[in-house]
Image (cartoon, helix red, strand yellow):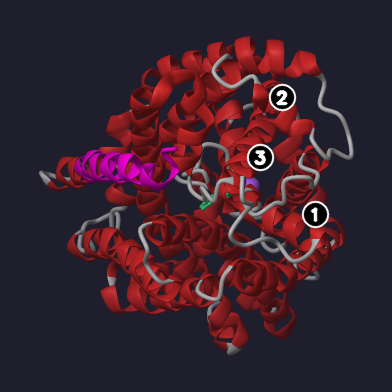
Amino acid sequence: AIGPRETWGTRIGLILSMAGNAIGLGNFLRFPGRVALYGGGAYLIPYFVALTLLGLPIMWLEWSIGRYGGQYRAHWLAPMMYVVSKRRLGDKKAKIVAGIAGGLALSIAILLNAYYTNLLGWVSFWAGMCMTGKIVEVTEVKDSIGWLLQVIGNPVYNLLPWVFTLVMTGIIVAPGVSKGLERANLIMMPLLFLFSVVLLVTGLTWRTPVKPEWDSIKGFLWLWTPRFEKLGDPAAWLEGAGQIFFTLSLGIAGIIPTYASYIKREDDIALGALTTTALNEFAEVICGGTIAFTLGYAFGGVLPIGMVYVDKKSPFFLSMAVYPAFFGKLGAVGAVLGFMWYVLLWFAGVTSAIAIANVIVEMLQGFGWKRAQATAVSVLLFLVFGVFIALEGYMTKDYSWGPSTVYLDFTDFMVGSVMLVVTALFETIIAGMFLWPEGYEEVNRGGLIRVPKALWKYVLSIIAPIYLVAMLVWLPMSTRIETIIYQTGEPLTWLGPALAGLSAAFTVALFIVGFVLGVKSTKQFEK
Ligand code: PHE
Ligand code: NA
């Protein structure tokens, strides 16, 4: 062991960077959408069961894999899984493990960030509208939908804020771990928490002067009133566990292990992983579970309109298509509140997107690339694989129901719901179950708290893999893939299947490339 190539500068920097990695659009938009669809307050049962049996144990596992790999200067998932499994499996099989890890990491990293940064572009578009004050001209929902359709269906409107987001991602990632990633998180994360708390309080206390019956508490109750009958639906359990993975960034291209690989051998990970999880849950359940729908209700009793979007899409669309009109109507106050909301979302997302870009940078650096060039290439890859989002919007902009987002939604389903569970299962089998019993020592070395042994022996080695296999069996059955491909039910002719097929073909192709690179990456760790 020679120690990581780069390390975090401070403990608070590590914690805020890990929190930044985990906290994303998933907390503020995806989570309230899942609560709305899967039982209101009752959804918290499958959600917290999954947090306890899957989320927290796998979070500890990923931190252990990462710090262990980092001591050998393995800084992305493929070489990490190689050094973790080599002793038991021998060189040949461990190389195959590295290949699978490489394939999963590369395909998820590129395809996920391609659409995620595109969505962040839409967010920055509205942040810009608030900042320049132009938002006050947007006072009707049809105005904001009109602008949104421009962003989706007009390549120029799509490209500008997206490229801005990609360039910012590159600027943050290029200078390195402590000078780039850590510094950016130290600035953005405190602001994110500040804006969240301001919007939380505003959301809960706002009484609109226009219509007193638009009481924000009604929005809160609408969302949270438990509907226990939903728990009989396997989808609620699947979506509870799926959300835990997405929100904690588990199984996502090894971004948590890569961040953990910059931790020194004797420094704590047990408490760090727990703290990160707790911060993410605060941002998710408390802030994310309050802000979107209280604001929505208070600013315009949006629920009747909003429900359409929750059913079809998510609070993401509520935020992009409905809220701008209400922020606009409130004049200067609305511009300030809107600015806080969109900047909060953008900070949340960018601090996750940089973690993904950093994985590709680490991969290329492992092959001898300079960091600056590697960063430029990673950002370009997101652009190349995401450009279909701009194109599909343009190609379908004349359809009666507006531009389609098949490529975006199908990719989200493939990588954001399926592949991350596959990755987590793979990590759990290789590193959690029996091949790497040293993992239990690893998680507790230098620990400020102690992770109980039973958690490793029973939860991680037995319950988690069974749970994950069950998820993989349920997932394709419970999700109606044709609703993604044929969007509003109207046939998209050949375009829908073609776009979904393109996304699937990219996943396979990138997996193969990642497999080869994963095997190659083990070269320097052979002895
Ligand atoms: N944890 C992130 C979220 O909640 C998921 C994510 C991570 C998305 C990295 C993109 C990049 O949004
Ligand atoms: Na999250």
Q: CA distance from mark 3 to mark 1?
A: 43 Å
Span shown in magenta: 505-527
| Mark 3 or mark 1: whose residue is earlier in sequence | 3
Which residue lies under the disc numbered 3?
A: 63
Amino acid at dot 1: Asp
Location of residue 205 by image quarter = bottom right
Q: SS for tag 3?
A: helix
Badge 2 density bin: few <14, some 14–19, many ≥20, Cα 10 Å: many
| Mark 2 or mark 1: whose residue is earlier in sequence | 1
Within the magenta stretch, is there residue 220? Answer: no
Residue 79: which disc? Answer: none
Location of residue 224 by image quarter = top right
Residue 440: which disc? Answer: 2
Left or right: residue 197 compared with residue 248: right
Left or right: residue 267 compared with residue 328: right
For the residues bearing labels 3 and 1, Cβ distance under 8 angstroms? no
For the residues bearing labels 2 and 1, Cβ distance under 8 angstroms? no
As drawn, 80 above or below 97:
below
Q: CA distance from mark 2 to mark 1?
A: 50 Å
Classified by dominant secondary structure, the portion drawn in magenta counts as helix
Which residue lies under the disc numbered 1?
A: 215
Q: Position of residue 167 (x, y in %)?
A: 44, 77
Which residue corresponds to the image point at 75% horizontal and 50% vertical from the top-left? 283
Q: SS for tag 2?
A: helix
